[in-house]
Amino acid sequence: MEITAGKHKALALLLDPEKADLSRLPITADARPDYIFVGGSTGGDTTAFIKNLKSKISNLKSATPVILFPGDASQFSAEADAVLFLSLLSGCNPEYIVGQQIRSARRIHDSRVECIPTAYVLIDGGVETSTMRVTGTRPLPPSDIQAIVDTCIAAQLMGKQLIYLEAGSGALCPVPEAVIRAVRAAVSLPLIVGGGIRTPEQMNRAYRAGADIVVIGNHFESHPEQLSQFCQSTQNTQNTQINPSDEKFMRLALHEAEKAYEAGEVPVGCVIVSGGQIIGRGHNLTETLHDVTAHAEIQAVTAAAQTLGAKYMPDATLYVTVEPCVMCAGAIGWSQIRRVVYGCPDEKRGFSRFAPRAFHAKCSVTSGVLSSECQALMQQFFKQHR
């Protein structure tokens, strides 16, 4: 079962064997999630539930993988197609980092069920969850992005194959977009996000921030009729996917923009890439340096020139969250950068309005990459500061 970061967006339906009523779930060819996760914090007859579930969906033309999302070792079932081999890295209880894993290891090893090592990272969703009570652990606060990112980096270094950011069942607030973006920028593993998502727009915001799979459970227990709407929204997102490489580097530019935001600067970020490697990065520093020329693009071009030891960059691509202004477009043109990718337009000061020929004659331009996220960050800043 291939789950790859950046390849496509997917929806996972989470069913708890103790609570889910399969007769109320309208799973059809038009309302078919990409994955069905089965599990809960307190148990249930997992094997019987999966058998009933597979019987219900057996008439679908294409199979939907049933993946175990176990709360403990007792919930493993050889009837599943795969199991998320979870380690609760956000907590300090060894029982759920390695203890339950040892208890289930022999059964999983002897079965034909695909095992996917997964880092499980709980983020505070504003309410005490059953996972917190059962494991005796506390979630990471969403404001401590550095701790969350470091935990996910550790997961990648440990050899995990997936990262699951979880706000918890019944969470009041989903995992914040800033957290998802920061993790996406720091690690290359596929990213699952769940908890507190109740609308297609919340789901799409998680996708745009970098989630590869969004998991929804509680909401569909109360509103099963909305499954089709969510599935269609995910399909629409899938059909409009952008170049994964452009998305990857624009997310890194967004990470730079968030640094500017935190420093009270207009949130514009930029990275310059050559040969698949970042050679320069920067964000707005006009207030910090008391310098009107200290735009993100200028900072990145200067850094890239120092990296290369040269002023011309004909093999480079510049990624910036907002359309460059005339000044920055001139600098980009003089540096001979041959490709520019930007997020949202700047209708008041953008180069395309005032100096559309400022770039090098052979420079190509791609616009609209993660435009909604780039624009939302700008709007949020100006709403708070002006």
Image (cartoon, rainbow, N blue to C red):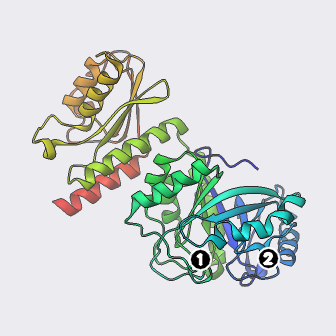
The residue located at (81%, 76%) in the rendering is 46
Secondary structure under the numbered disc 2 in the rendered image = helix
Please give the residue where the numbered disc 2 appears in the rendered image: 74
Residue positioned most to the left:
290
Q: Position of residue 40 (x, y in %)?
A: 69, 77
Q: Position of residue 24 (x, y in %)?
A: 74, 80
The residue located at (11%, 38%) in the rendering is 291
Please give the residue where the numbered disc 1 appears in the rendered image: 219
Q: Position of residue 39 (x, y in %)?
A: 72, 74
Is residue 131 toward the left or the right of residue 245 in the image?
right
Q: Is residue 280 above or below residue 156?
A: above
Is residue 247 toward the left or the right of residue 37 in the image?
left
Q: Is residue 180 above or below residue 324?
A: below
Label annotation for residue 52:
none
Residue placed most toward the observer, 7 or 26 = 7
Q: Residue 240 falls in which quadrant of the image?
A: top right
At label 2, the amino acid type is: Ser
Q: Position of residue 195 (x, y in %)?
A: 55, 71
Residue placed most toward the observer, 90 or 342 = 90
Mark 2 vs mark 1, foreground winner is 2
Gap in angstroms between the C-alphas marked 2 and 1: 26 Å
Q: Is residue 165 above or below residue 359?
A: below
Whether residue 342 is visible: yes
Secondary structure under the numbered disc 1 in the rendered image = helix
The residue located at (53%, 65%) in the rendering is 200
Is residue 124 toward the left or the right of residue 98 in the image?
left
At label 1, the amino acid type is: His
